Amino acid sequence: MAMKTGKEYLASLDDGRRVFAEGEELKDLGAHPQFATALKLVAEGYDRHHRPGKDVSGPYFAIPRGPGELKDILELLLGWDMVTVTTSQGLLALLTAAARVRPRHPGYARRIEDYFAHCKDNDLRCVQAITDAKGDRRLPPSRQEDPDVYTRIVERRPGGIVVRGAKLHISSAAVSHELVVMPTKNMKPGEEDWAVACAIPVNAPGVSIVNTSYAPRERQADFPVSSRHNMPEGFVILDDVFVPDERVFLAGEIEHSGTFAHSLGLWERLGGTAHLAEYGDTLAGLAQLVAEANGTERVAHVREKIAEMVIYATLVRGALEAAIANAEASPEGWYFPSELYTNAAKHHGAAEFSTMIRHLHDIAGGAVVTAPSVADLEHAEVGPFIRKYMRTKEGVDGEYRTRLFHAIRDFTADAYGGWQLVTMLQSGGGLYAQRLVARKHYPMDRAKALALALAGLAEG
């Protein structure tokens, strides 16, 4: 067992994987501008965490054994690149699923633990491949015109299975080592072939990844956020991929088809809430800065909007703290965040996120999308005029205010901002899924008892 350096990580990607972007198959990921920032971020993460010697591993392989350790992992997670975050969340989700399937399927639980050890021993990065193409949403998997629109087992061989399908919205798949495939939903009798969970190397025969990206191609100075933080989005094709038995975690047991999705949803929603809390504070800070730059910080409606943003950020963070404080132990001694508080926190944070963006744009004004570029600021002839007319008051020069508008646009109103808006809503499943889980875990019997007592209808 040894930890990889950034150089060793980059070398490990030259493994025959099939990656496509913008209409061509890429033979050298590092040579394509869409992947430059992502590879740099992940490689830097490897170098930052690297420790020499054997029997060492990164903190992203830590298994929390108490609320304090869970909180420590979440605080560290905010500083990790997306690939490292998804590795931690995905493997913890697998362990959560292992704890839940162990009573009836101990063999699957052991395979999951062995796979966790394999990733840890080889310092691998994993992504979770869960969302299927789904075809006609009105129909279940077994009644689709094309049965492959939900990933399924097409052959059972001695020593393994063959799977076919596609997984969509798989962030950073092309720059990771492993795909952890899970059912996208709970399967019913007759849908056993679609109840499949397994781990597949990115370079396995039959795997292809088609990528899109919100990475800016030019005018890097005008994109202070996305030029430094971006990852490719993968459309993963599984064309008759053989998976050996030791990497199969579910193969037809429909009673646990939803276990993996629910386990992953828990950890993705917890991580998403941590980021929402951080972004809530960032949005409030941007709103205050641009209000001060515009000279509107004392205007009543501006103050009210910023106060609402402060309350939003505080409530999301408070619910996140409650999810950790009410963490629950598995029989193995692993700690998982509270289902109730995690789902309620993520729902509130995601549902109100767009309103916070609206407040910021309303406070900032139209220059969020019309401010001249940094190159124009630096132009010998027009630059002085831009500085003159973008200035508002003592201490707020035109360049500072222009760059502040660029930061707001990049973070909330351009390609990266659009990606954020959709991702915050959909990560860990949509709002409806979070409402379902929150309702399931809410102590409704206690609430009913309180109501009956209030009405004088309680027995005894």
Image (tube, rainbow, N blue to C red):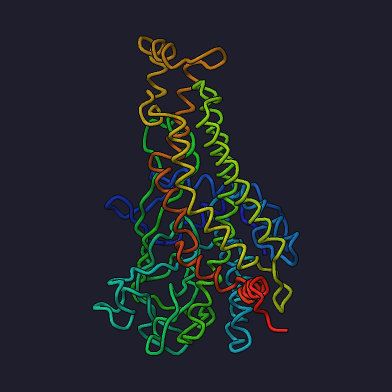
Q: Quadrant of residue 208?
A: bottom left
The reply to whether residue 84 is in sight is: no
- Work out whether residue 224 or residue 309 is closer to the camera in this orientation and state it: 309
Please count the marks in the image: 0
Q: Horizontal placement of 71 versus 439: left or right?
A: right
What residue lies at 56% left-to-right and 25% top-to-bottom?
Answer: 298
- x%, y% of residue 451? 63, 71
- Work out whether residue 449 or residue 424 is closer to the camera in this orientation and state it: 449
Residue at the extreme front:
456
**Quadrant occupied by the C terminus:** bottom right
- x%, y% of residue 150? 35, 75
- Work out whether residue 321 or residue 122 is closer to the camera in this orientation and state it: 321
- x%, y% of residue 129? 45, 67
Q: Quadrant of residue 185?
A: bottom left
Q: Horizontal placement of 440 versus 405: left or right?
A: right
Query: Does residue 452 sit above or below 349 in this rendering?
Result: below
What residue lies at 38% left-to-right and 42% top-to-bottom?
Answer: 415
What residue lies at 50% left-to-right and 39% top-to-bottom?
Answer: 228
Q: Quadrant of residue 416?
A: top left
**Quadrant occupied by the N terminus:** bottom right
The reply to whether residue 320 is in sight is: yes
Query: Does residue 206 sit above or below 235 in this rendering?
Result: below
- x%, y% of residue 178? 50, 65
What residue lies at 42% left-to-right and 30% top-to-bottom?
Answer: 222
